[in-house]
Image (cartoon, rainbow, N blue to C red):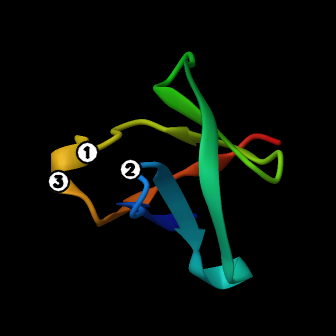
Amino acid sequence: MKVMLRMNDAGTLVVYVAKKDLEEEVVKQTDGNDGKILTLANGWELEFRDLPERANLPQTVEAKRLA
């Protein structure tokens, strides 16, 4: 699924999923088998193969929902 990553005013990474009209802060970041796994405040886990640098945000990237 396509998601947009951006930084909010507090400096926290935020994920926006347009198809679900969902915007949540990232509460945890871990390494997975195929890339980075971001855990959102609502409990979703999204896996990113190529997570962009924070300096290059906002950016739309491909993610895979794990949970």
Query: Which type of secondary structure does the marked residue at label 2 adopt?
Result: loop
Q: Are marks 1 and 3 in contact (CB under 8 Å)?
A: yes
**Which residue type carries mark 1?**
Arg
**Badge 3: how crowded within 10 Å, few (<14), some, or many (20+)?**
few
Looking at the image, is mark 2 or mark 1 nearer the viewer? 2
Residue identifier under label 1: 54
First in sequence, mark 3 or 2: give its number. 2
Residue identifier under label 3: 56
Q: State the quadrant of the N terminus.
A: bottom right
Q: Position of residue 35 (x, y in %)?
A: 46, 26
Please indicate whether residue 5 sits to the left or right of residue 25 in the image. Answer: left
- In 3D space, how far apart are the residues under numbered discs 3 and 2 (Cα atoms)? 14 Å
**Which residue type carries mark 3?**
Asn
**Which residue type carries mark 2?**
Gly
Residue identifier under label 2: 11
Between 14 and 52, the one lying in front of the other is: 14
Residue at 33 percent across and 38 percent down: it is 50
Q: Position of residue 47 (x, y in %)?
A: 58, 38
Q: Position of residue 8 (x, y in %)?
A: 42, 62
